Image (cartoon, helix red, strand yellow):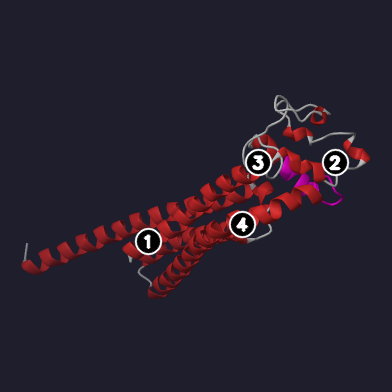
Amino acid sequence: MGATEYDEKKETCGTVCLKYLLFTFNFLFWLAGGVVMAVGIWTLVEKSDYISLLSSATYAASAYILILAGAIVMVTGVLGCCATFKEQRRLLRVYFVLLLCIFLLEILAGVLAYIYYQQLNEELKQNLRETMVQKYRQPEQEHVTKAVDKLQQEFKCCGSNSSSDWGESVWIRTNEADGRLVPDSCCKTQTLGCGHRDHPSNIYKVEGGCITKLENFILDHLKIIGAVGVGIACVQVSKK
């Protein structure tokens, strides 16, 4: 075998190995996109009820951005595989433009999550109590009612700061409440009319009320959103 033939074979082998290596990177990139999109969808679908209790749209916006970024990542992964094997410069240009878009979107999601992380406590203090007191069981506020009932049952809490908040509820003061002191969803064992008794043996009385529980829940999710967004963006930087 001549030196020229050996060099050509070596070059061909190197090119093939590089192609498969790039294909593997793009496949993993595609999987990462699926993870990013799944986190965004999970945040919106699984816990969408709680979003209606927040006055700011930042929490939902962060999740939507992750879904968009994840979808673009998956498309980019497929495009990267095609560009690698077909060796088309136009595809490669589009590929790198999409990578830049993804990077910016994921950084934006991470930054939004961080900013909202800082202002969440104040927002909940200002708005959650008013939402629960003014909108619970009111016309065209079914989504708020559902969210409040789910919040109190899932997190085993009652009222925004405490169960006494319900004393100022618009609904509690109406005949529809039928003399209840708290909604039935405050009860440890939920039955029709159980809200007539607000004794600790019957309802959830936790320090900090539902504000503390919801805040901890959202903060944990914001950490996930921020970490996933910035983490995948960092992977992209190292890949480039």
Q: In this rendered view, identify the residue nearer to me: 185 or 162.
A: 162
> Circle 4 — which element?
helix
Q: Nearer the viewer, residue 208 or 226?
A: 208
Q: Is residue 238 above or below residue 191?
A: below
Distance of mark 4 from mark 3, alpha carbons? 15 Å
Q: Nearer the viewer, residue 151 or 133?
A: 133
| Quadrant where the image shows the C terminus | bottom left
Q: Is residue 148 magenta?
A: yes
**Residue, disc 3:** 209
What is the x, y in percent for residue 138? 85, 48
Distance between mark 3 and mark 2 Cα atoms: 18 Å
Residue on which disc 1 sits:
234
Nearer to us: label 2 or label 1: 2
- Chain part drawn in magenta: 136-149
- Reading the chain from its start, which is encountered first: label 3 or label 1? 3
Q: Quadrant of residue 9?
A: bottom left
User: Looking at the picture, which amino acid does disc 1 mark?
Assistant: Cys
**Circle 1: element type:** helix
User: Looking at numbered disc 3 in the image, what kind of residue is underneath it?
Assistant: Gly
Which of the marked residues, 2 or 4, is nearer the chain's N terminus?
4
